[in-house]
Image: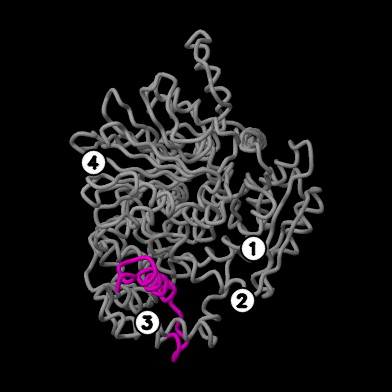
Amino acid sequence: MCGIAGLIGYKGDASAAVSRMNDRMAHRGPDDDGIYIDKDRKVALGHRRLAIVDLSKNGAQPFVSASGRSVMVYNGEIYNAGSVKERLLATTNGNLQFRSTSDTEILLEAIERYGMEEALSGCKGMFAIAVYDKEKNTVTLARDRVGEKPLYYGNACGAFVFASDIGCISAIDGFDNPIDEDVLDIYFEDGYIPAPYSIYKGIFKLEPGTILTVNVGTLENDKTTYWSMKDVAKKGQASVFKGSFEEASSELERLLKDSIRGQMIADVPLGAFLSAGIDSSTVVSLMQSISPGRVKTFTIGMEDEKFNEAVYAKEIARHLGTEHTELYISEADAKSVIPKLPFIFGEPFADSSQIPTYLVSKMTRDHVTVSLSGDGGDELFCGYKSYESVSRVWNKIKRIPYPLRKPLSSIELMATGTEITGREDLETRYLKAKYLGAASPYELHKFEHETDPIIKKIALKKGTAKYKCMDLPADFLSEVNHNVMLMDMLLYHPDDILVKVDRTAMAVSLETRVPMLDKDVVEFAFSLPIDYLKDGKTGKRILRDVLYRYVPKEMMDRPKKGFSIPISKWLLEDDLRSWAEELLDKRKIQEAGILDCEVVEKIWRDFTDRGIYRIQIWYILMFQLWYEMEGPGRHK
């Protein structure tokens, strides 16, 4: 795990600029710092290294291929590097001489020999890559299938730029790209900015499973997709797994074990997060079953019992026999993280579980350099409670011909105050219910008629950016839950969950790995029939079946408390309330000219005077804090 950066066609001192970019992401790679400048000074590549495999200088980057034709900077891990190397040796009759034991060299040689698309198709891993091909005079960027590793790119300072951290780009001398106000509607609905957008005009996030090639001479670029989550889901549901539930459960267990076995390869200490939920408990159970020694596991506890699962995690760890470490954090510990958030994320990001995720990563890094996590279980195996709500609503809607839905909706709303039929498709309703904060689609009318008009006025300009998955028709997959799980894997998981985990862990130089996002696991998950995923209102049926082979069912039968903190409570306490009111000062907001100060004040007063807490309060605070510490406001 590392950080990469680069400039193409930069007119100034490219070495100084890339050095500045490297410095901005030193936390992503504290072990080494490398720069490559081509002879014509048109291409500059930067790299910060967190050494995980081959800790020697032989694995340092930027890495030059054996032929000298290609130069690569790379962030990530290739878990099947051994098999890729065997194929390379076979196709070169053993004539290729490797200078290191790093997956970096194996990946670069595979790319040079097979081309980027074919090479990546044969790799399992997480990665963000940039390869300068001297013969073709191109720089090619690529990102892993699901979006575990970040990669920003675009035009700034008269050059084509790219980096793992958007803060590296804004740190370049002369950077003056304005805020992209078109994306603010999405941000103030979701609390994050989804790919391909970023907070700045002209700067974008490379989508998962995508390759972008830049012509060094003209700076023109084009994109191709080498792996598509939509295609995987469509193919999986077109050829549903035919075996029994027990056979499917055993196959999932095998695939997860294979994934975990590959992701346990490291030349540094390794462990796993254990939150006491189904997902992390499954990963830790399988890790311990194949580990020759005791797996190191890590949990943080909260003083507030409503948010504390540490006692359950300790019980599971004791049952599995792991070497368990727990740390109880105070409110003061959590609140101390808030000023760090703008630097950690580089752009506005407001999933408040970013705070405990940072704290568990920080504690874990005191003991290991790599940690496996259970992320992905909810989205792949029907775990969120909202899926059940969407099913109930859609089962009512789908029986009504679309031309009749809108007029029936109006009659129903007037008669009952509840609108369940007026949406054109499931996706629109689901996005609003899940991301705008309504408890369920049944309560959506309460939110739409009071809050939605207010939220849409936070930004002075109405945005024009669109969700990247909104082109999915309601019947893209035949079963409604598969549709919404696919939406989560296209939007929420890569742009919220994976961003949160990557940025907070890398802020403390901890590599995180996600076994459930293995290519084979993802493809198998989308081939499963819905009754293998859920049993009535209970989700993750098949994942639970795997887990119960290692942990007694009664040990897991309890309400999940979640990895969250009581933000609404804290914001009414003196210290955070005064901090919030300073950020929301009317004069500051007017001077910035981005937000509608009257609407912001109403939302805040509704909370403090009337007890109406909207999640957008935290979104606004995170935007304002970023604006003042990392955005244009820091120059004022």
Q: Label 2 is placed on what type of residue?
A: Ala
User: Is residue 534 visible in this depiction of the protein?
Assistant: no
Q: Earlier in the sequence, mark 2 or mark 4?
A: 4
Up-down relation of residue 388 to residue 370 (above or below): below
Q: Is residue 621 magenta?
A: yes
Query: Residue 633: percent from the left, percent from the top?
Result: 32, 72
Image: 330 above or below 168: below
Between marks 2 and 1 in the image, the one whose residue lies nearer the viewer? 2
Q: Of tags 4 and 3, which is closer to the observer? A: 4
Q: Indicate yes or no whether the magenta region holds residue 591.
A: no
**Res. 59 in view:** yes
- Residue 360 falls in image quadrant: bottom right
Residue at which label 3 appears: 584
Mark 2: secondary structure:
helix
Q: Amino acid at mark 3?
A: Leu
Please report the residue visible at 37 percent of the width from the left and 77 percent of the height from the top.
417
Whichever of labels 3 and 1 marks the residue nearer the N terminus, that label is: 1
The residue under label 4 is which amino acid type?
Gly
